[in-house]
Amino acid sequence: MVIARTTSRSLPNEIADFKPRLLAFAHSLTHDWADAEDLAQETCLHALSAADRFALESNLKAWLFTILRNIHLNRCRRDAAIRPHMVGIDELSVDRLPDATALGDVERQVVARADMQRMVEAFRSLPSAFAAPLHLVAVEETSYAEAARLLGVPIGTVMSRVYRARRLLMAALAETG
Amino acid sequence: MDPCGEHRPYVGALADGEFGVVPAPTRQHVIGCRDCTGDLEAHRLPTAGLRAGLRESSALRLRRRPRMRLSLIAAAAGVAATAMGTGLTGWSVTHRAGDLVDLALTAAHRAPQIRSTDPVVVALWCSRFSDRRLPTMSIGTLGLDGARMDAADGGRVVTIFYRTSDSRHITVGWVVDSGPSPERGAVEARPVGDRIVLVVAVPAGKAVLSGDLPASQLWSVAGALEGTIG
């Protein structure tokens, strides 16, 4: 979904309106509310200070999410103690990944009756490598191509991670359901 | 052998309407396969609940954290709009063009028009009520307290209020004027009573630093400020 800029509202207002969404995406990357708030805040500040470089016809959401991701990656690079979550996928335990078997009827039923709160809790348990692409596609309704660009990975990787993220989500719901 | 195995990884993409990344044989298989259509439905199910849940939880998070509350902006906007409309003294017109540094020093002793520790809130407020380039908000380890705006013939002063870790106050008055500026980065020390203020040349004007802290600390802040403006 492309957010078209309107001329009736100022850019600072539009950036402020994005803050909850930036915070949610930041949390999918950091898994920590304090870090996510800092990240969302720094993104807003960076965007405000660079507002004169933002073209009117541009996609504000893509611009803001790209800034956020770049700040996140720069922080990860700066701090050797923190590993970039987006490249940690190879280190994940293979045992945690769902295989390519069909979903059982029980899993489908559990997913069908899961409430919003449990869905969010299950999502929070996902590794960032899966949570971030699923967040962009399911919550921000970005295309796979745009998610790939925002995350700096091939489109096939987005497809694979979104698929696996949903399988992990359903498995987590089934475990607690 | 599982006849669905090779097609199953694409089910999520189909559920998201990403038909372009799904091979035609897979699309044909899924349409005619009961297991795969079941998976397709299951992959569609979490999306709406997840979207609503995550948006709600992050919005709740922002409402619970005062430093992230955007309602402050609206409140500040209302206060400032009232001040502008009624000609309150927050927008001084008693200073001449050449007095903007003096105006910055006067403003430093006035109360902030917006009080917030959130740089985004203060930056938004400043950008809304001045057409100048946004002032630097974060300087070293200083804590943010708020901001105010004062105007005079020929220029404006945006004053940002800070405090140090030992609760001393410091202000940075961003002076926007059309007059000649010293060389960028130059720092002028001016005695004011038993203290000094520092006037730092910045793009499009000056930054006036003052506060109830020793001169050595003020110079350190000036150094940090220069670092932020490049």
Image (cartoon, coloured by chain):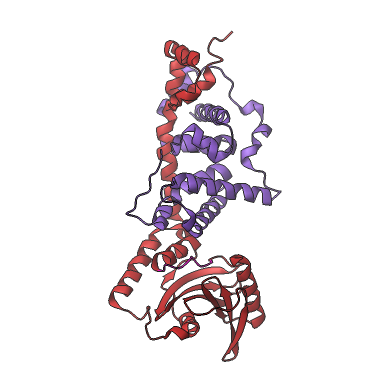
Chain colours: A purple, B red
Query: Does residue A64 lie above or below B202 as drawn?
Result: above
Q: Main secondary structure of the magenta part?
A: loop
Query: Does residue B109 lie above or below A40 as drawn?
Result: below
The residue at 61%/39% (across/down) is: A86
The residue at 42%/13% (across/down) is: B31
Residue A16, how many percent across, how many down?
42, 55
Query: Left or right: A155 with respect to B151?
Result: right
Whether B134 is among the magenta residues is: yes
Extreme residue in the top direction: B1
The residue at 56%/30% (across/down) is: A161
Query: Left or right: B183 with respect to B75?
Result: right
The residue at 66%/30% (across/down) is: A93
**Residues rendered magenta in the picture:** B130-136
Query: Left or right: B88 with respect to B57?
Result: left
Whether residue A110 is visible: no
Residue B171, how many percent across, how many down?
53, 76
Q: Nearer the viewer, residue B40 or B181?
A: B181
Residue B34, how many percent across, how many down?
44, 12
Total numbered labels placed on residues in the image: 0
Extreme residue in the left direction: B86
Whether residue A56 is visible: yes
Query: Does residue B78 lie above or below B190 as drawn?
Result: above
